[in-house]
Image (cartoon, rainbow, N blue to C red):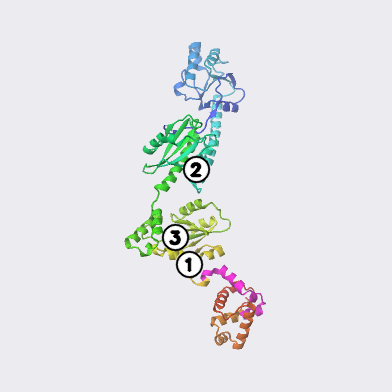
């Protein structure tokens, strides 16, 4: 069976639908029962024999020129009508004037005899107006069908991105097309099955053997046909699912009791194309990621301990997975979801990150995702990701042997990104505790640890903070801090004692001193009013 030609119409208008749009002045002289017939076009013709130029399902219009003179004899008129019926013309419209004031009796008798629907078209209704009305109606109907096809294609795409794409794609297909569907693998076994709820679950799989043999042994695009005396299976047609090199990877078999419309065939072809993409990805797509995963899973230490040949092989697999070269550097990128980001499901998100970062090495994680990419992740790409409601930790350039360390450095910044809600680049961060903490986290630490002091009036708060900063900078030395601050050592001792009581901390502990020192680096963010030196800021 040959596929639908590209020029096949997606929808048709029936004669009855068309007549409802026409003025009531159009009079039916004889009803030939063709109201449900599908009209292909409306065509005026004054030829004695127009049938060589008429497609099936035509509404023919004539002003009666063929019936003037000898052409108006009963025999000539009867032969004219017979030719129209043989050509499967849907209806004949006879226009009043300029040649006739009424429909000739011979034409009325012939149409009744051959059961051809006949209309009288008044002079007030030009043939051009009838043709224009039909084209507008057809355009409206085609627009409706195109909207339905667009909606159906969106459903098919959503199915492909679901966790069980093959099953969901068949479910979406039978929802829009009155068929049962069976997806078969290259081994002939059923991988998925769906029926349309019309009472038919398809035919026994054993009965499909001859069709499957033809589908899985042939070559090129084709459709195999069969039929069975079972509900919903009068017409059974199969489509092979082929690799890019025309290897047969499986087949889609559909069953129905009636031929499919052009629009329904369009949906089927879309489903076949998407199923081919799925099986190609699973069986004959890029082989590098699966080889890389197998090597790393079976020999996890081989990246650092393997021989040069083995490591170079891994580098090649990584490069293929990144659309890159063996010597090109790569980056680890971690993504964190923030408020407002859409949750599209793991499969859709995985494909989204693979596309944006041009890599097949993406992992969906509990915090978001991690990816290895050859891209530099410039500000434009970062902005695109942030518009989706995500924030990134962007690693520095590295090679295969440095990936683990690069991932750890990126992970150390993730909490900062979560806290601040801002993306971070590893190579722009100051690698110190204060640099890693960031402004927001540091201010939170200062506010928590120093709250009792910060709540004091400025004239008491600022001297205490100054003493604490000086004492810690001198590693707790009374003499050193007294000299630095210009105070007596006993005064320093007394004020440090006050601070210990206010903070409820043992300032002799090294950990406490370290935490207070880090907190003091951010205290200026929290102090509003006179500066620490007593002057108005």
Q: Is mark 3 on a helix, strand or loop?
A: loop
- Circles 3 and 2, Cβ within 8 Å, touching? The answer is no
Q: How far apart are marks 1 and 2 (CA)?
A: 46 Å
Quick check: is 444 in the magenta stretch? yes
Q: Name the residue under label 2.
A: 169
Which numbered marker is on residue 376? 3
Q: In this view, does 114 lie above or below 437?
A: above
Crowding around mark 1 (Cα neighbors within 10 Å: few <14, some 14 to 19, many 20+) is few
Residue 140 seen from this side: yes
Label 3, label 2: how far apart the Cα atoms are: 36 Å
Q: Give the range drawn in magenta.
A: 435-464
Q: What label does residue 428 carry, if any?
A: 1
Q: Is mark 2 on a helix, strand or loop?
A: helix
Q: Is mark 1 on a helix, strand or loop?
A: helix
Counting from the top left corner in percent of width and height, residue 12 is at: 52, 30
- Tell whether position 4 is magenta: no
Label 1 or label 2, whichever lies nearer to me, is 2
| Image quarter in which the N terminus is found | top left
Where is residue 93? Give x, y as percent. Answer: 54, 21
Do the residues under discs 1 and 3 have CB atoms within 8 angstroms? no
The picture places residue 105, in percent across and down from the top left corner, at 56, 13
* Residue that appears at 53% across and 69% down: 437
Nearer the observer, 348 or 79: 348
Residue density around tag 3, few if under 14, some if 14–19, many if 20 or more, within 10 Å: some
Q: Which circle's residue, 1 or 3, is located before the other in the chain?
A: 3
Magenta: main secondary structure: helix
CA gap, disc 1 and disc 3: 14 Å
Q: Which residue is drawn at 56% across and 70% down?
A: 442
Which label belongs to residue 453?
Answer: none
* Numbered disc in front, either 3 or 2: 2
- Nearer-the-camera pick, 133 or 526: 526
The correct choice, above or below, for 167 with respect to 31 in the image is below
């Amino acid at each position: 069976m040959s596929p639908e030609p590209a020029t096949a119409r997606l929808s048709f208008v029936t004669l009855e639908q068309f007549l409802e749009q026409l003025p009531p002045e159009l009079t039916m002289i004889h009803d030939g029962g063709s109201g449900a017939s599908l009209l292909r076009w409306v065509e005026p013709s004054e030829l004695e024999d127009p049938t060589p130029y008429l497609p099936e399902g035509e509404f023919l219009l004539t002003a009666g020129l063929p019936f003037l003179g000898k052409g108006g004899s009963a025999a000539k008129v009867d032969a004219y009508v017979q030719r129209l019926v043989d050509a499967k013309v849907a209806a004949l419209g006879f226009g009043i004037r300029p040649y006739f004031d009424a429909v000739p009796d011979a034409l009325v008798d012939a149409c009744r005899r051959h059961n051809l629907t006949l209309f009288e078209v008044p002079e007030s209704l030009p043939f051009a107006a009838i043709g224009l009305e039909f084209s507008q109606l057809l355009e409206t109907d085609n627009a409706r069908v195109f909207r339905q096809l667009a909606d159906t294609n969106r459903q098919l795409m959503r199915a492909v991105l679901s966790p069980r794409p093959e099953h969901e794609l068949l479910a979406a297909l039978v929802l829009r097309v009155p068929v049962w569907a069976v997806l078969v693998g290259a081994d002939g076994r059923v991988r998925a099955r769906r029926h349309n709820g019309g009472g038919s679950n398809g035919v026994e799989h054993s009965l499909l053997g001859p069709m499957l043999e033809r589908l899985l042994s042939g070559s090129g695009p084709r459709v195999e046909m069969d039929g069975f005396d079972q509900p919903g299976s009068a017409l059974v047609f199969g489509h092979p699912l082929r690799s890019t090199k025309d290897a047969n990877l499986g087949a889609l078999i559909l069953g129905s009791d009636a031929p499919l419309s052009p629009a329904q065939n369009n949906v089927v072809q879309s489903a076949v194309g998407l199923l081919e993409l799925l099986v190609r990805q699973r069986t004959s797509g890029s082989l590098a990621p699966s080889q890389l995963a197998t090597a790393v899973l079976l020999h996890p230490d081989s990246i650092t301990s393997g021989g040069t040949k083995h490591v170079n092989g891994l580098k090649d697999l990584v490069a293929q997975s990144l659309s890159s070269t063996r010597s090109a550097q790569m980056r680890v990128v971690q993504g964190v979801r923030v408020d407002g980001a859409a949750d599209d499901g793991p499969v859709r998100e995985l494909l989204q990150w693979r596309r944006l970062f041009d890599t097949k090495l993406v992992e969906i994680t509990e915090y978001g995702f991690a990816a290895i990419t050859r891209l530099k992740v410039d500000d434009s790409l970062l902005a695109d990701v942030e518009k989706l409601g995500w924030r990134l930790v962007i690693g520095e350039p590295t090679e295969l042997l440095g990936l683990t360390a690069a991932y750890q450095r990126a992970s150390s910044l993730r909490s900062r990104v979560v806290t601040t809600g801002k993306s971070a680049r590893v190579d722009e961060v100051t690698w110190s505790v204060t640099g890693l903490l960031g402004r927001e986290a540091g201010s939170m630490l200062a506010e928590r640890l120093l709250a009792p002091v910060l709540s004091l009036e400025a004239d008491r708060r600022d001297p205490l903070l100054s003493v604490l900063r000086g004492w810690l900078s001198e590693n707790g030395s009374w003499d050193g801090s007294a000299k630095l601050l210009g105070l007596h050592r006993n005064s320093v001792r007394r004020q440090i004692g006050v601070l210990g009581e206010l903070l409820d901390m043992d300032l002799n502990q090294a950990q406490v001193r370290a935490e207070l020192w880090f907190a003091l680096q951010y205290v200026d963010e929290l102090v509003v009013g006179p500066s620490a030196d007593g002057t108005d800021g």
